[in-house]
Image: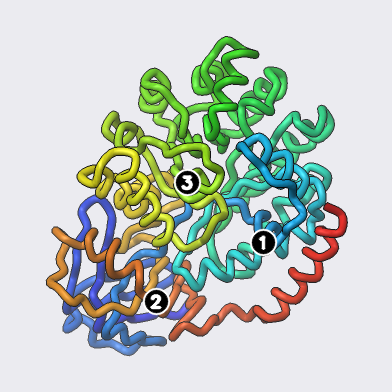
Amino acid sequence: MKNILIKNGTIVTLGEKNKVLTGHALLIEGGLIKKIAPQKNFKGKYAKVIDAAGKVVLPGFINAHMHFYSTFARGLGKADPSRNFTDILNNLWWRLDKKLTNEDSYYSAVVPLIDAVRKGTTTLIDHHASPFAIKGSLTAIEKAVRETGLRASLCYEVSDRDGTETAKAGLEENSEFIRRAAAADDNTIKALFGLHASFTLTDGTLEEAAYRGHKLGAGFHIHTAESQADQLHSESQHKLRVLERLRGFRVLGKQSIAAHCVHVNDEEIRILKETGTAVVHNPQSNANNSVGIADIVKMMGQGVLVGLGTDAMTVNMFEELRAALWLQHLKHDPSQGFMEAVNALTVNNAVIANRYFKGLGELKEGFAADVILLDYFPPTPMDASNFAGHLVFGLSQSAVDTTIAAGRVLMEGKKLKLGIDEEEVARKSAELAKKLWARF
């Protein structure tokens, strides 16, 4: 793999000890960051030189909770109006996912992955459901990820809502894909054991999933207390809060992701902290579904690892970051939530992703060469002490110019370099979506 020198830009390393470096250059070699040093130290010849003048150089962003298949819901007007979260699932998502084919799953992934390249998001942790096309669905999505050059952790959403046989097929799809991803061990595709939510899982299915997941050494990815309905079901049917029930089945832990956690009490926050389970906040989705605002200020204040996802509302992590901040202000007051929202994206998402991948989320020698360049001339002084302000109020409004993942240039000068015909992908996707809508 050829080396690449990025020069003349402002390098922002991120990580727990963020540095803002001027007068430095960054060398990529073999898919990794080989060297970051003062620009005068680079005197050799390089296969490719990128002039980053007028640009900020950052690590690629990470989306910690995504649903690629949601692409085919875009513009769908056939769902009945929904007055609550349960209606939304029944009227839209659980009708849509039943109609997906593996070809649909592939194209509904390619489209947001291409957009992720444009938005500087280089790693996505996805959660998939296609209950009548389960076998091979994760392989179809893996194909899309590899073709676009990004990284992803994939899982299949096991649920009992469509019967015992579909639950068994979901268990097997996860198990098989986890084994394949572990055997590949290439830092591109990883796997978690996907579970829908406590209220759609029987004790028997949870027990079998936990047994398989632990035997395979995999963590779990599950929607957790997204709506109050999840808690009401758990308390009425199992006499336990959601996180108490999941803890009892050994689904929680440092390899697991509890998405949402909008409706958790103090004891459940303690369980999250105790088990080291990562929470992923999805503010735009929670607002759109009118389920509430997760209290990330409280959770992070009590030592819970909270990252940021989009739940398929977007692949633009800047957009989600700003929504997270505004909603924490709305929940608390304008003095709270700023650094919690920023750290969820810039620090914690990397901590979460590096539980599965290696060397993501920071510009550091030896780390993965997932690098993005954004157009930005700081109109006020910018250094490590105030970078978060520039991120939220300035860089978030800037265009991504260049996206590099694993040392491969995927977009440069705002032009895709994927070798994929984006227009043809959109045409085929629309053709498949039209057929799916006819089956809806």
CA neighbours of label 2 inside 10 A, class few (<14), some (14 to 19), many (20+): some
Disc 3 marks which residue? 282
Precedes in sequence: disc 2 or disc 1: 1
CA neighbours of label 3 inside 10 A, class few (<14), some (14 to 19), many (20+): many
Report x, y in % for residue 81.
69, 46
Q: What residue occupies the far top of the structure in this picture?
A: 239
Q: Residue at x 35, y 71 (%)?
A: 397
What amino acid type is highlighted by mark number 3? Asn
Q: Secondary structure beneath disc 2? A: loop
Disc 2 marks which residue? 399
Q: Is residue 137 left or right of residue 186?
A: right
Report x, y in % for residue 395.
31, 69
Specify the quadrant of the image occupied by residue 186: bottom right
Q: Residue at x 28, y 78 (%)?
A: 376
Precedes in sequence: disc 1 or disc 3: 1
Q: Are marks 3 and 2 in contact (CB under 8 Å)?
A: no
In this rendering, which labeled residue sits more in front, label 1 or label 3?
1
Q: Is residue 402 left or right of residue 128?
A: left
